[in-house]
Image: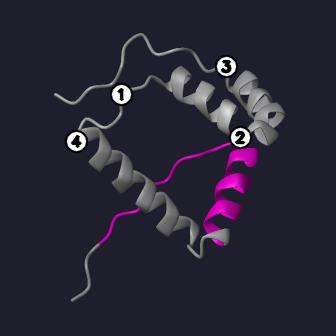
Amino acid sequence: MKTKTKKIVFRVEDSLFEFIKAFASRNGMSLSEFIRNVLIYFHTGYLLGEFQKTMPELQEDFMKNFPDTKKEMKRFLKKRRVKPLSRQLTPK
């Protein structure tokens, strides 16, 4: 039996699109499959209370663990002007 699906459309910057597209391809997934898995992962983790860090804390950890991408990440964040979250996300 085929499951009925809905389409979700949103825009991202070229550099993020290319990164996601390449990442999905290297992992043997289509772009749609990868984004779907990301949404399921986030939703599951959020409901289980697994996300204990704010976005700025995650970005800092990312920069520490992936130093080769530091310059590109700084450029991306500066371009987007990411602001710190005023509170941590916690499930209700």
Q: Position of residue 43 (x, y in %)?
A: 31, 47
Residue 63's quadrant in the figure?
top right
Compared with 5, 13 (above or below) is above
Residue type pointed to by label 1: Gln
Q: Position of residue 89 (x, y in %)?
A: 33, 25
Residues packed near mark 4 inside 10 Å, few (<14), some (14 to 19) or many (20 plus) = few
Q: Position of residue 85 (x, y in %)?
A: 46, 16
Q: Where does label 2 land, which residue?
A: 66
Q: Position of residue 42 (x, y in %)?
A: 37, 46
CA–CA distance in space, label 2 to label 3: 20 Å
Q: Which residues are magenta?
A: 5-25
Q: Where does label 1 land, which residue?
A: 52
CA–CA distance in space, label 1 to label 2: 20 Å
- Mark 4–mark 3 CB contact (< 8 Å): no
Residue type pointed to by label 3: Arg
Compared with 60, 14 (above or below) is below
- Mark 3–mark 1 CB contact (< 8 Å): no
Check the picture and name the quadrant holding the N terminus. Answer: bottom left
Q: Where does label 4 land, which residue?
A: 48
Looking at the rendered structure, the secondary structure element under dot 3 is loop
Q: Nearer the viewer, residue 52 or 84?
A: 52
Could you tell me which residue is drawn at 16 percent across and 28 percent down?
Answer: 92
Q: Earlier in the sequence, mark 1 or mark 2?
A: 1
Residue type pointed to by label 4: Leu
CA–CA distance in space, label 1 to label 4: 11 Å
Q: Where does label 3 land, which residue?
A: 81
Q: Nearer the viewer, residue 85 or 65?
A: 65
- Mark 1–mark 4 CB contact (< 8 Å): no
